[in-house]
Amino acid sequence: QVQLVESGGGSVQAGGSLRLSCGSSRMITSVFRQYTMGWFRQTPGKQRELVARVTGDGGITYADSVKGRFTISRDNSRKTVKLQMNSLKPEDTAVYYCNAAKDTVDYWGQGTQVTVSS
């Protein structure tokens, strides 16, 4: 069973920065490379939404709301994916989830809270 472990959430004032990290120690490197790694977020009463994702060969997609502020990166040798979040806004407040996806398979982390105060 793949286990994704997130870290780096917390509270910050508007305009500040946070960096989220997600690791998968149980996934061997050659398998990790095959997965698209992503970050999603969810607020109470709303559907989980894509924030950013990066394919195994480096193709990146961002939600329009975070373009120019967030940067996703992956390190296949370390089996990690990071999300650098700058110029944070109160509307970025959510639980952020790490995701690994391949074909019809999805794995999720436990989520980490990000709170941005005005």
Image (cartoon, helix red, strand yellow):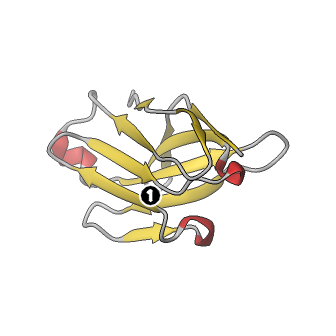
Q: Please tell me whether residue 83 is drawn above or below residue 10 in the rendered image.
A: below
Would residue 53 be found to the left or right of residue 45 on screen? left
Query: What x and y, as percent, mark residue 83?
Result: 41, 50
- Outermost residue, right side: 45
x then y, percent, for residue 22: 38, 37
95 relative to 47 in the view: left or right: left
Q: Residue at x 53, y 57 (%)?
A: 87
Count of marks, rendered view: 1
Question: How many residues crowd around disc 1 within 10 Å: few (fewer than 14), some, or many (20 or more)?
Answer: few
Q: Which amino acid type is marked by label 1?
A: Asp
Where's the N terminus, which quadrant?
top left
Above or below, 111 against 71 in this view is: above
Q: Residue at x 32, y 34 (%)?
A: 23
Residue at the spot 64% in from the left edge and 54% down from the top edge: 89
The front one of 71 and 38 is: 71
Q: Nearer the viewer, residue 103 or 65?
A: 65
Whole-percent x and y of residue 97? 54, 40
Residue 25 picture location, percent across and down: 26, 28
Q: What residue is at 52 percent from the left and 47 percent from the top?
A: 16
Residue 62 in the figure: left or right of residue 28: right
- The residue where tag 1 is placed is 103
Q: Is residue 39 above or below residue 108?
A: below
| 110 on left or right of 47 | left
Q: Give SS at disc 1.
A: loop
Q: Based on the displayed image, in which of its 4 quarters is residue 12 positioned?
A: top right
